[in-house]
Image: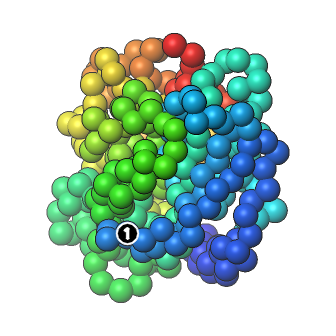
């Protein structure tokens, strides 16, 4: 698996040069790109903003911030020829009248910095030095971190979103700026950072969708202290269920095979913290793997949960 992960990382970085210069094609609506958005906190990166076909300055729209922005819209523009097809799924739901229309802010990952940007910082800091060394070693085996002790940069990544990107979107687009209309979503490591975002910034984000959340943090489930650290963090930091909505899911194939056992423990924490069907949903998808194709097939579920018409 380690050689495969290293190959995929190399392929992703190489293909990124192509995607950097080509706007994704969408079936409906329009993509507006901010090239190499500058930040004081993270490396510069593209931002792809999708607006619905009938977007109007006379209306106000909720906003969905999504990670791995280069994988969201057009399979022809991605390294693996797969995409979430967010524009397809959302446009269909808009047409049925099931959900409110919203805009999507697709935040490109930083390539080599992705794992650092998306790995929740505070749970990592809670580990002992021996446990941190274990995480570092496991990530080195997966060719994620080759030098020194692994040091997540997710606190800086979230500051970039909250202090730099969101103000730009609020100023330049006709959007609601309050918590009740600000959401965040991602898959795998993007699921982790979405979970972390709503816990760290409960006054900013009113909802989070965490698909195939990478609860093991590394790529080795054995002797791995990470899941317990995440569970402890959730126990102590989940936001108020009365004004937040959180969605989780997972399959049981490929990388997703590591998640169901941990997700069931997360589900119990959600129940213990007062979450119910109005504020929380966990879905299990037997037979589904860890891929954009899988997430695209079920994206309608979290979108209907988060954006149901009030």
- Residue at position x 52%, y 44% in the image: 173
Question: In the rendered image, which quarter contains the N terminus?
Answer: bottom right
- Residue at position x 73%, y 64% in the image: 23
Labels in figure, total = 1
**Which class describes the residues within 10 Å of circle 1: few (<14), some (14-19), or many (20+)?**
some
> Of helix, strand and loop, which one carries label 1?
loop
Q: Where is residue 232 in the image (x, y as percent from the top left)?
A: 24, 42
Q: Position of residue 299 (x, y in %)?
A: 66, 36
Is residue 167 toward the left or the right of residue 256 in the image?
A: left
Asked whether residue 12 appears in the rendered view, the answer is: yes
- Residue at position x 65%, y 43% in the image: 51
Q: Is residue 11 above or below residue 193?
A: below
Residue most extreme to the front: 58
Is residue 266 toward the left or the right of residue 82 in the image?
A: left
Q: How is the image coloured?
A: rainbow
Q: Which of 41 and 147 is in front in this view?
A: 41
- Residue at position x 74%, y 69% in the image: 22
Q: Nearer the viewer, residue 239 or 201?
A: 201
Asked whether residue 212 appears in the rendered view, the answer is: no
Quarter of the image for residue 139 reads bottom left
Q: Where is residue 53 in the image (x, y as percent from the top left)?
A: 74, 38
Q: Where is residue 242 in the image (x, y as percent from the top left)?
A: 31, 17
Where is mark 1, residue-wise? 39
Q: Nearer the viewer, residue 283 or 222?
A: 283
């Amino acid at each position: 698996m380690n050689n495969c992960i290293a190959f995929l990382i190399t392929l992703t970085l190489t293909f990124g040069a192509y995607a950097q210069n080509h706007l994704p094609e969408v079936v409906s609506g329009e993509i507006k790109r901010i090239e190499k958005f500058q930040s004081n906190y993270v490396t510069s990166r593209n931002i792809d903003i999708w607006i619905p076909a009938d977007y109007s300055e006379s209306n106000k729209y909720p906003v969905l911030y999504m990670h791995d922005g280069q994988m969201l819209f057009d399979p022809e523009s991605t390294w693996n020829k797969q995409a979430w097809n967010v524009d397809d799924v959302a446009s269909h739901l808009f047409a049925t009248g099931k959900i409110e229309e919203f805009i999507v802010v697709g935040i490109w990952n930083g390539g080599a910095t992705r794992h650092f940007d998306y790995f929740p910082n505070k749970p990592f800091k809670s580990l002992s030095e021996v446990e941190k060394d274990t995480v570092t070693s496991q990530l080195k085996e997966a060719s994620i971190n080759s030098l020194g002790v692994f040091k997540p940069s997710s606190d800086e990544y979230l500051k970039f979103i909250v202090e730099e990107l969101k103000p730009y979107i609020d100023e330049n687009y006709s959007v609601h700026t309050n918590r009740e209309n600000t959401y965040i979503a991602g898959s795998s490591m993007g699921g982790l950072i979405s979970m972390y975002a709503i816990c760290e910034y409960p006054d900013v984000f009113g909802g989070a969708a965490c698909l195939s959340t990478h609860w093991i943090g590394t790529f080795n489930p054995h002797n791995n202290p990470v899941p317990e650290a995440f569970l402890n963090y959730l126990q102590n930091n989940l936001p108020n269920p009365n004004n937040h909505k959180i969605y989780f899911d997972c399959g049981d194939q490929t990388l997703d095979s590591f998640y169901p056992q941990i997700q069931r423990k997360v589900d119990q924490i959600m129940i213990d913290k007062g979450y119910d069907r109005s504020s929380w949903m966990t879905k299990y998808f037997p037979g589904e793997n860890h891929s954009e194709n899988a997430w695209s097939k079920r994206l309608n579920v979290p979108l209907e949960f988060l954006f149901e018409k009030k």
